[in-house]
Amino acid sequence: MRRPLIMAPMPAALSTAPPPAPTRPTRRWEFDALRGLMLVLMTLTHLPTRLAEYLGQPFGYVSAAEGFVLLSAFMAGMVYTRKGRRHGIPVMRRAFRQRALVIYGCQLLALLFLFTVIAVLGLGIDQPAVKNLMSFYLQHPVTALLAAMALVYQPPLLDILPLYILFMLISPWVLSHGMRHGWRGLLATSLSLWLVAQFGVTHQVYDWVVARTGLPVPFHETGSFDTLAWQFIWILGLWMGAQLVVAPQALPPRAQFPQWMVVVALAMGLVGLVWRHAIGQVPLPHWPEVNVLFDKWPLGPLRLLNLLALMVLTLRFGPWLAARMRRPRPLEAMGRASLPVFCAHLGVVLLVLAVFGEASPQRPLWQDLTIAAGSLAVLLAVAHAWPRWAPRWPRGRPNLNAPQGSASSVEGS
């Protein structure tokens, strides 16, 4: 008999009087390596080189951003569910708030870097790419600065961390509700929010706010990601991570999906992979009304199906592959230090954009390759240096009994 993928809701008593936590290892190197791979792909996609055309969305009509958000949510669900079961819900909530504060600090530093160093470089060189990137700030500096600190104004490339902060702030409520009452209602609500987002509800909410507050920030300057749509990936990842703690048998070492589901996922994954590399990153260049179904920012339906197909294939065949491959230590290091590496990638991309401008076919290939190699070298250096030089951010009371390399001992990464 196959093991079920969804377990029964955990009794409410467990949320306030947690049982002893399992002692099985909780840091899974393959998840760190996958997150490191997403960071590498994200960097190569954001760098203004010709490589972005070939390495953007390499597995189909799914980008590194979807994979990074899903994996980050999975790790958060695993780490903070264990913390809630060991130390109680209030401790878990406090840990989430502290982590959100750290990410907010990273966002402020990224904005400061953009508005000072990059602005001086870009304007000094008269770089059109930088002027376009921060056009609203150049036109309305005070409004832009205050709105950026409030996470309303989100310049391109700097709109992922605000999304992350919001998701971290809602996660304590989501996890505690899931621990007490189960996940079916949460997943159904999350899917419903994604569905209404496909009909432009997010823009309607923005218009409602502008009509009542006079918000001076244009809609296109509030970030590219549709929050109502992308929350579904986050909630899905939280559930998967929590299940690995609450009911490890729900996600066994080799997930036992129905055979038909694996076949369908394999077919969808292969079609998406071949289609993307045969046609390009725009699925149907002459059918814009169909391309909306693949749109990244509202997480269009066909894009979500492509992501879910790849997720099923990863859970089904990933353990088999991980058991037979050599561990990619550089990717693991990047995945463990995902937040500082992500911030380093932002700094590198902005610097390259300020100095070299947009990608150009006239730029020599060796120069693009040097930019890419140098950027990845910086990320790897940050990943290896961070454990030694990182500031001791608040992480709650340490668990002295946690095994070395466990999620509880590295949750701040």
Image (tube, helix red, strand yellow):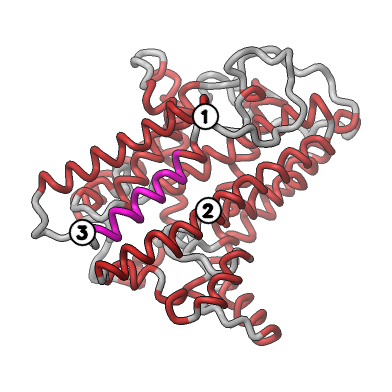
The overriding secondary structure of the stretch rendered in magenta is: helix
Magenta range is: 341-356
Q: Is 343 within the magenta? A: yes
Pointer 2 residue = 109
Q: Which mark is residue 359?
A: 3
| Relative vertical location of residue 13 with respect to residue 213 in this rendering, above or below | above
For the C terminus, the quadrant is top right
Please tell me which of labels 1 and 2 falls first in the chain: 2
Please state the horizontal and vertical placement of residue 305, each as a whole percent of the image: 45, 49
User: Disc 3, disc 1: CB below 8 Å?
Assistant: no
Residue 121 appears anywhere in the view: yes
Residue under pointer 1: 389
> Which is more foreground, mark 3 or mark 2?
2
Within the magenta stretch, is there residue 64? no
Instruction: Classify residue 245 by image quadrant.
Output: top right
Tell me the mark number nearer the camera, choosing from 3 and 1: 1
Q: Quick one: SS at disc 1?
A: helix
What is the spatial separation of the Cα atoms under label 1 and label 2, in whole angstroms? 18 Å
Q: Check contact, mark 3 vs mark 2: CB within 8 A.
A: no
Q: Is 287 positioned to the left or the right of 100 in the image? A: left
Q: Quadrant of the N terminus?
A: top right
Calculate the distance from the C-alpha at mark 3 to the C-alpha at mark 2. Answer: 26 Å
